[in-house]
Amino acid sequence: MEIRTIHSEFRVKSEDGKAQISGYAAVFNELSDDLGGFREKIQPGAFSETVKNDDVRALWNHDSNYVLGRNKAETLRLSEDEHGLHYEVDLPDTQWAKDLSESIKRGDVTQSSFGFAVDSDEWSKQDGETVRTLTKVTLFDVSPVTYPAYPQTSTSARSILEANKDRIPDDGADSGQTTARLDIQKKKLELLEKTL
């Protein structure tokens, strides 16, 4: 499973006496930061099948002990629009969900994230950078989060690069620079793993 985190606008509202939060777990056509030698963007429609067919949860901080909602239970609603993957969840009547709602209202929690597996992607060179475009994914969860999951993303990035080296286009012009960047990123990941 891969995880991506974005800065998102949250809304907290109360409907029929129940608290709800909503936001975007992913945005379309926006380049990510460097994920270890490549950048990534999401193509509109990448979530269309998974939103209709899969059993997706809303979790607090990707922790399955804190289930906020579930689409099959109709306590989580997912949709794609021109901006990205939107979600709205009816919060459970629990103390930790009330605490989360308060943290969002105060501006302490401002990021969303989604856990996913890649069904299809495309690799290209754009302005000298390697870009991965997610064209179809299987969604596991959407989550308001405290921090981006840097170690998990970095570990995933390394395995993605190694598994897809032959798919990354090489225009020949900067292959030495690309190899050097990948070597540096690999060394950084090895150092990070030693400290964890």
Image (cartoon, helix red, strand yellow):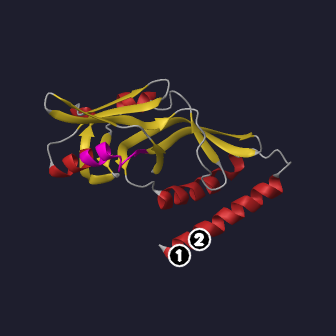
Q: Residue furthest right?
A: 173
Amino acid at dot 1: Lys
Q: CA distance from mark 1 to mark 2?
A: 6 Å
Label placed on residue 194: 1
Give the magenta part as a residue range: 102-114
Image spot of residue 128 (x, y percent): 77, 45
Whether residue 106 sits left or right of residue 155 in the image: it is left
Q: Which residue is mark 2?
A: 190
Residue farthest to the bottom, as pictured: 194
Q: Nearer the viewer, residue 112 or 196?
A: 112
In terms of image quadrants, where is residue 104? top left
Element class at badge 1: helix
- Nearer to us in this view, 179 or 163: 179
| Residue for point 57% across, 55% down | 157
Where is residue 192 drawn, in percent x and y?
A: 54, 70
- Name the residue: 49% across, 61% down: 151
Residue at x 50% of width, y 32% of height: 46
Does residue 101 sit above or below 79 in this rendering? Answer: below
Residue 94 higher or lower than 159, as above or below: above
| Snapshot quadrant of residue 126 | top right
Q: Are circles 1 and 2 on residues that touch, CB within 8 Å?
A: yes
Locate residue 15, reporting x and y percent.
19, 28
Q: Residue at x 45, y 56 (%)?
A: 149
Residue 107 placement, left or right of 135: left
Q: Is residue 117 above or below residue 50?
A: below
